[in-house]
Image (cartoon, rainbow, N blue to C red):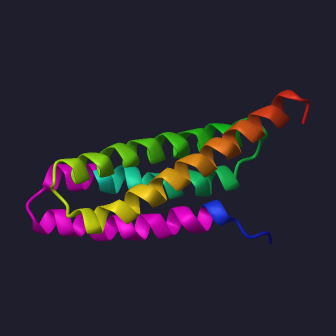
Amino acid sequence: MRRSIIKEKSFAFALRIIVVSRWLRDQKEYDRGRQILRAGTGIGSNVEEALAALSRPEFVAKMSIASKEARESGYWLRLLRDSKTVPTVRIDPLVLECEELVRMLTAIVKTSQGTQTSGL
């Protein structure tokens, strides 16, 4: 079976998001903690669904949702950083990791859409 880098990276990202979410809960930041938890773990769950897709259109649709979840995660991470809710040293690595996921997912969707319209 072929190794999926996006699957591995999105899972690792989700694990780190869980840690931040727990920290936010401990700080009584319940709403934002739930938001980042839902968006940050939603990336990997949609990647998993995409990898089990029965058709290319289904694959593209699920990867597109994963991309949207990554963009939403980036929003929440920037909000947490810029509002000084979470220390910069803790959040900046996640912001960079999230930006990498967005770039990867965007490339996957664009490439898959290109092959989809070319008759594959």
Q: Residue lying furthest right in this view?
A: 119
**Chief secondary structure of the magenta span?**
helix
* Vertical comparison of 56 with 34: above or below: above
Please state, as top left, top right, bottom left or bottom right, where the N terminus lies in the image.
bottom right
Q: How many marks?
A: 0
* Vertical comparison of 50 with 93: above or below: above
Q: Nearer the viewer, residue 74 or 40?
A: 74
Magenta stretch holds residue 13? yes
Q: Residue lying furthest top in this view?
A: 117
Rendered residue at 46%/65% (across/down): 13
Please state, as top left, top right, bottom left or bottom right, where the C terminus lies in the image.
top right
Residue range (magenta): 7-35
Pinpoint residue 45: horizontal percent, then vertical percent: 51, 56
Rendered residue at 62%/60% (across/down): 6
Residue 41 visible in the shown view: no
Magenta stretch holds residue 89? no
Q: Is residue 7 left or right of residue 55?
A: left
> Quarter of the image holding residue 86?
bottom left
> Quarter of the image holding residue 9?
bottom right
Pinpoint residue 56: horizontal percent, then vertical percent: 77, 40
Q: Nearer the viewer, residue 59 or 104?
A: 104
Q: Is residue 1 left or right of residue 78?
A: right
* Vertical comparison of 78 with 118: above or below: below
Rendered residue at 53%/61% (across/down): 10
> Quarter of the image holding residue 19?
bottom left
Pinpoint residue 31: horizontal percent, then vertical percent: 17, 49
Rendered residue at 69%/46% (across/down): 108
